[in-house]
Amino acid sequence: MIRENLEWLIVMLRNPDAAVVVRNHSGKTLRDFLETLPREWISEDLMEALTNRGVHLSPTVFEVGDWVKFRRRITAPTYGWQGARHKSVGFVQNVVDRDNLTVSFCSGDAHVLVNEVVKVIPLDRGQHVKLRADVKEPRFGWRGQSRDSIGTVLCVDDDGILRVGFPGASRGWKADPAEMERVEEFKVGDWVRVRPTLTTAIHGLGSVTPGSIGIVYCIRPDSSLLLDLSYLPNPWHCEPEEVEPVTPFRIGDYVCVKRSVAEPRYAWGGETHHSVGRISEIETDGLLMIEIPNRPIPWQADPSDMEKVEDFKVGDWVRIKASVSSPKYGWEDITRNSIGIIHSLEDDGDIGIAFCFRSKPFCCSVTDVEKVPPFEVGHEVHVMPSVSHPRLGWSNEIPATVGKIVRIDMDGALNVRVAGRHSLWKLSPGDAEKLSGFEVGDWVRSKPSLGTRPSYDWNTIGKENLAVVHSIQDTGYLELACCFRKGKWSTHFSDIEKVPSYKVGQHVRFRAGLVEPRWGWRGTQPDSRGVITSVHADGEVRVAFFGVPGIWRGDPADLEIEPVFEVGEWVQLRVNASSWKSIGPGSVGVVQGIGYEGDEWDVSTVVAFCGEQERWVGLTSHLEKVDRLVVGQNVRVKLTVKQPRFGWSGHSHKSIGTIAAIDADGKLRIYTPVGSKTWMLDPSEVELVKEQELCIGDWVRVKPSVSIPTHHWGEVTHSSIGVVHRMENGDLWVAFCFMERLWLCKASEMERVRPFKINDRVRIQVGLVTPRWGWGMETHTSKGQVVGVDANGKVRIKFQWREGRPWIGDPADIVLDDSFGINSTS
């Protein structure tokens, strides 16, 4: 019997035509069936619905240890409440006689009549519980945990009090069982794993193997589960605490056998650990039907034997899995700590990985590797303490050296800027370790994505509160301080995020929805505004509120920054702002000050717009900051501007001018040759003209104006298209799909071209004599879609009406097919 069945019985019993006395094929009625169920499963609603239809169950038999509560209809128990409440839950201490019970409640023992109480489903040791939503203040008060905290029942005292343990708490929290409820962790259809550490189960393990993966078949009224496992004929009965959630398999997922599985539950059929297949069907018990290339029929597998093959793409950062004893083609000079970047993906599951200490890609199977978080420009790094000899050498640095990544080569080599050094330090990513990125004095808060996972210490101060970094430890832990807690506490840098710090002079207001500041209102109002006069090292702020005498002490979490622009900042009117004279949304001006009404700021800002003698005064919320233009920058008039405010002065949209001077109201004076008419422009009418430099990863070719490159042509021609893999001091190292080694050239000799991307519609170049790797089945009229792009520019194309493997081509041999009209722009 599942919970939903009992709930639907209530609905069906309300139907006047419900056949309550009909018998099933075994000759049993509804009453006969309900009599076999534990009485605590039958709710008061169901009992009333049965009574209304003339169905009467046998009297409830109470035993010592049964959990009970007062019936809903009881307003005045025969012997009084005796300290208990209407919703109190207790357990039977003594069955005095057939009509009288002694029940132990949190408030003490109580004498009750049998017809005044009903059985309830008990809470037991090891179960996960949380506070009921309707409980405003727990009987025994709060002690560190928050409302959404999840705890574990440690024991039930003889006096009916629960002891609940919460993560990080040193001892159990006292709780009234009436105020707690079991956590609903799963629903029907969820994929779960029997906990690998499980040695015994409340309802018995039977033939179940810890670590097995199955699907929740149903949830019983007592919250226990029936679990479908592919190798059992019937569902397995278990408690939700005995299983854990897992990511479900889906039809279309690519999978392989786990390296830890020597012999799958369903025998090998010529497959190996390197075999990759696609799930074509999933049975209701989780059994997977897998299609494997070159296998005539699908292979079936137990889900606990399988793992998903990650969806890799060119450019992913990877390393060899810890579970792999040997990659498909051996180790060569790769180690477990080596980190590389995928450069190519083959149809048979093989991949090519670039490592910065190798001249050729390393070949292995997709089942051999796993993704790792990529390094990014701006990360602070150092050599891992366990590394004594970096792959690329020390370059006069020492283990204590710390630097910031300023460039990353296509093979993963990190170019690190070290303070006081002119040249960049090259590091292999497998030798490098990212630092926390935090500094002493940074303001932080718990990451919102952590949910209920933060440490116990974060729960004691609240996840929305702010802290300040007091010290940084080598282990990745930070020591934090906050203004309302004595002492410091530690947390890992991955659990927190930076927030803007509060500074002296900032305008502040109370946070929206604030019920009461930490130390009370003390003369302020929810709409009060003020200016920060001091900030303490633990984050405590002192604020001068307008109209409030003295300096107000506050918790920064109670406040929020009031946007105020500084004099000289460039701003533009937002789209929701009203037009004023010749000024409208999008107009750019310069802040001149803020407005006051008496001695208080009235939330307005004063702005000077060029072309207007009078200054604009309006709400600060109607403005947004824009980048300031500076003398020497090149600009041109936006194409959307038909007629500049101050005229063309003989120029056009194609004209590019250099800013010679800027007035206090933002008016631009553009440099013009001597004798020419002065050209002035409104800053909202122009856009910057920037010459974008080549970067690693750009697709390039030799400029037509270059007759002979500095380092000669080699196999490269003007039509050749490659990818920039490395750059240094004006030199580029470019990868071409037809060359094993990188081609050296000068950056000034190359120009950027649009890269081919997956899903691009393409055709073969008109006039091409022979593609680099032959025609295959294709002709000049062939049209197809790009399905893969290697890091050296090699493209893989699926042509129309062709089956089998994609066609491999040189990017110089194909062009975009504009007839489709759906290719993305670069």
Image (cartoon, rainbow, N blue to C red):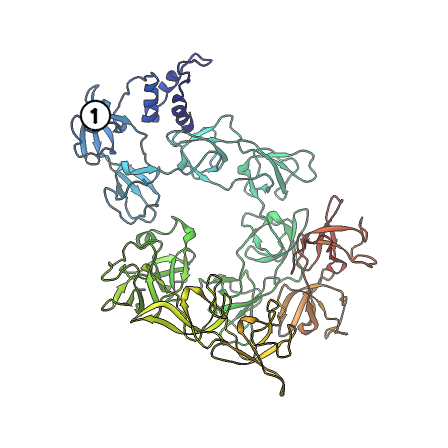
Residue 40 image position (x, y, % from top left): 32, 26
Q: Amino acid at mark 1?
A: Asn
Image coords of residue 196 (percent x, y): 45, 39
- Above or below 435: residue 614: below
Question: Quadrant location of residue 68?
Answer: top left
Per the image, label 1 sits on a secondary structure element best described as strand
For residue 728, side relative to residue 763 (left or right): left
From the image, tell me which residue sits under label 1: 94
Q: Is residue 390 above or below residue 224?
A: below
Give 177 or 640, whichever is nearer the viewer: 640
Residue 43 makes an appearance in the image: no
Residue 35 picture location, percent across and down = 35, 18
Q: Is residue 275 left or right of residue 167?
A: right
- Residue at x 51%, y 28% (from the top left corner): 232
In the rendered image, the quadrant that contains the N terminus is top left
Q: Residue furthest bottom?
A: 675
Q: How far across and down, in percent of the image, does residue 158 sit?
A: 22, 34
Residue at 23%, 23% in the rendered image: 114
Residue lying furthest front in this view? 581
Q: How many marks?
A: 1
| Residue 454 visible in the current orientation | yes
